[in-house]
């Protein structure tokens, strides 16, 4: 009888899984893109965002798990299993993680949050460090996730070092027959985890020192004829660090796109850029958009261009970037905020 019940559960689950995956063939890309855009839009620096949809084999194995009492751990597997879609966010250092969690909490319904790092520390052990969220796409779905309203999914947030440790440890344990691990390997993993925690703390300290240095100085671009020098993707990071020392750098690969945005609006020289980032302009944009987090170079320049050129900036650059389908709506939303604040006509 129990076997028949289990078979019926699996047949129903398999049918729902096949129907869902057929309806959402790009689910992994959709979730990764949406979360990536949320974090980028908030001006956060992060290493990567990836997503995956659970395979049928993996879902089936999880659905058949039983507790100590012999009952199914997930009585209604389609609704009780929350990681059909799994998203992973890796940050450069642990000080960035609270901001990532805050952005996700603002844009999604967070049903449960687990700090694996704190749990491990409380237990007096070293090991897997990560923040786990069980989220749901609400009615006010982020751009790109409207077809998934009501969908639950899991998000892991951890540092690059935590991710490397977890992936290697997972690979070693899964390759071991019957989960048998030499005690020396356990000790080595524990030691590595402790060193990783120390390294993350040092990265946090480096980030704090850099933030302090940015706040102490405002550089100037000097030299005869400097204003006539043409801009390029290679020089933009250094120039913007001098002109906007309190604004963090963006990812290196994004400056080529930033050059495209500037060029599309005729901002092609150091002098043009200096005028665009005048302190009063930056202050007006920051007041209008009320950033929760300090935006990076690319986001602040994009918004300064929007404030300076209005709807023309949307027309000129709306179809550029990694996600052209979502960009025009995002720009128009920000433009509406600027108009409401009275900084754009």
Image (cartoon, grey):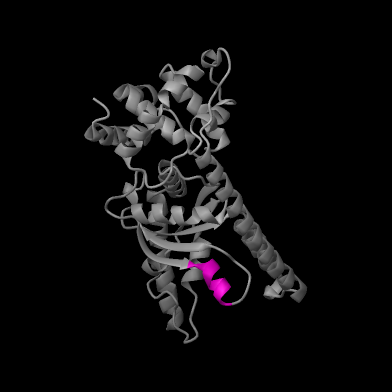
Q: Residue at x 41, y 44 (%)?
A: 42
Residue 185 among magenta residues? no
Give the farthest residue toward the bottom.
69
Q: Nearer the viewer, residue 230 or 189?
A: 230
Q: Residue at x 42, y 53 (%)?
A: 21
Q: Nearer the viewer, residue 254 or 93?
A: 93
Q: Quadrant of residue 127?
A: bottom right
Magenta-colored span: 115-123
Q: Quadrant of residue 335?
A: top left
The vertical placement of 202 against 181, above or below, is: above
Q: In the displayed structure, does residue 61 sit left or right of residue 325? A: right
Q: Residue at x 36, y 43 (%)?
A: 291
Q: Quadrant of residue 224?
A: top right
The vertical placement of 264 against 36, above or below, is: above
Residue 193: image location, x then y, percent = 66, 65
Q: Nearer the viewer, residue 265 or 325?
A: 265
Residue 118 among magenta residues? yes
Q: Which image quarter holds the C terminus? A: top left
The vertical placement of 78 against 331, above or below, is: below
Q: In the displayed structure, does residue 42 sit left or right of residue 245? A: left
Residue 45: image location, x then y, percent = 51, 45
Q: Is residue 169 visible?
A: yes
């Amino acid at each position: 009888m129990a076997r028949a019940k289990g078979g019926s559960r699996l047949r129903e689950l398999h049918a729902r899984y096949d129907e869902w995956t057929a309806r959402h063939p790009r689910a992994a890309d959709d979730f990764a893109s949406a979360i990536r855009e949320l974090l980028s839009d908030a001006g956060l620096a992060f290493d990567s965002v990836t997503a995956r949809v659970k395979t049928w084999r993996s879902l089936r194995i999880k659905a058949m798990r039983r507790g100590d009492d012999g009952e199914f751990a997930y009585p209604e597997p389609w609704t009780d299993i929350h990681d059909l879609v799994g998203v992973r966010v890796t940050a450069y250092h642990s000080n960035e993680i609270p901001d990532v969690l805050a952005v996700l909490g603002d844009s999604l319904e967070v049903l449960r949050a687990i700090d694996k790092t704190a749990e491990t520390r409380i237990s007096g052990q070293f090991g897997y460090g990560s923040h786990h969220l069980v989220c749901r796409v609400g009615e006010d779905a982020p751009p790109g996730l409207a077809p998934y309203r009501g969908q639950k999914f899991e998000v892991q947030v951890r540092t690059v070092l935590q991710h490397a440790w977890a992936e290697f440890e997972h690979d070693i344990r899964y390759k071991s027959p019957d989960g048998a691990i030499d005690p020396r390997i356990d000790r080595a993993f524990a030691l590595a985890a402790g060193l990783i925690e120390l390294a993350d703390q040092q990265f946090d300290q480096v980030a704090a020192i850099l933030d302090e240095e940015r706040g102490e100085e405002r550089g100037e671009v000097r030299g005869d004829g400097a204003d006539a020098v043409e801009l390029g993707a290679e020089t933009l990071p250094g120039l913007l660090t001098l002109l906007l020392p309190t604004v963090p750098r963006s990812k290196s690969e994004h400056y080529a796109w930033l050059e495209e945005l500037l060029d599309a609006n005729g901002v092609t020289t150091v002098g043009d850029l200096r005028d665009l980032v005048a302190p009063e302009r930056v202050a007006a944009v920051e007041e209008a958009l009320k950033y929760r987090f300090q935006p990076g170079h690319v986001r602040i320049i994009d918004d300064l261009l929007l404030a300076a050129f209005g709807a023309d900036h949307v027309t000129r650059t709306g179809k550029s970037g990694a996600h052209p389908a979502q960009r025009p709506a995002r720009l128009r939303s920000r433009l509406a905020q600027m108009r409401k604040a009275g900084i754009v006509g």
